[in-house]
Amino acid sequence: MSFKHFFTIIVFASFAIFASAQQVIQIQSTEVQQQLKKDNSWVILDVRTADEFKEGHIKGAINIDIRQPDALNKIDKLNHNAKYLVHCRTNHRSKIAVDHMAQSGFKTVYQMTDGWNGWSQNNLPVGK
């Protein structure tokens, strides 16, 4: 194989890898609430612990504790074409999840940067 062919293959492979990575959109809890009122198709992914989730969560949220060893495998099984809102208590654990989702080809991923703390402090609706 010539250097030219090898180089071409490397360029296309690199493009394919970067093309599959999606952008994560940062959003605040008050804006999330407005968006959820307009569009109920969002999948809300709460990556806090099960105990944190039981204390209160956004109505309709699914819980995948990002600290569990199988968390990323569970996330990979989700519909990659849905619109996701991902959050944790602050935004540290959700960053792990959204970075993984972006690299795994999820099309639309929003990270609630003020997390559950922001949601609670803004007195937004809580499911239990």
Image (spheres, rainbow, N blue to C red):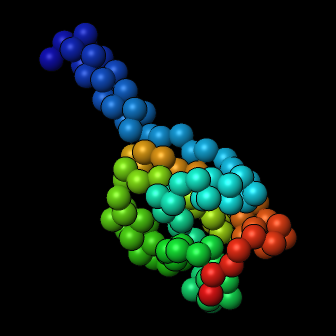
Q: Position of residue 118 (x, y in %)?
A: 79, 65
Q: Nearer the viewer, residue 19 or 54?
A: 54
Q: Position of residue 103 (x, y in %)?
A: 45, 47
* Residue 62 visible from this viewpoint: yes
* Residue 84 visible from this viewpoint: no
Q: Position of residue 119 (x, y in %)?
A: 75, 68
Q: Is residue 42 left or right of residue 33?
A: left
Q: Tell which residue pokes out farthest to the front in this image.
A: 38
Q: Tell which residue pokes out farthest to the right in this image.
A: 121
Q: Nearer the viewer, residue 20 or 119?
A: 119
Q: Residue at x 75, y 70 (%)?
A: 124
Placement of 59 over or under 39, stated as above or below: below
Q: Position of residue 31 (x, y in %)?
A: 71, 52
In which quadrant of the rendered image does the C terminus lie?
Answer: bottom right
Q: Nearer the viewer, residue 51 or 3?
A: 51
Placement of 58 over or under 53, stated as above or below: above
Q: Tell which residue pokes out farthest to the left in this image.
A: 1
Q: Residue at x 51, y 60 (%)?
A: 40
Q: Is residue 35 left or right of residue 70?
A: right
Placement of 31 over or under 91, stated as above or below: above
Placement of 84 over or under 1, stated as above or below: below
Q: Residue at x 33, y 31 (%)?
A: 16
Q: How many marks?
A: 0
Q: Quadrant of residue 75?
A: bottom left
In which quadrant of the rendered image does the N terminus lie?
Answer: top left
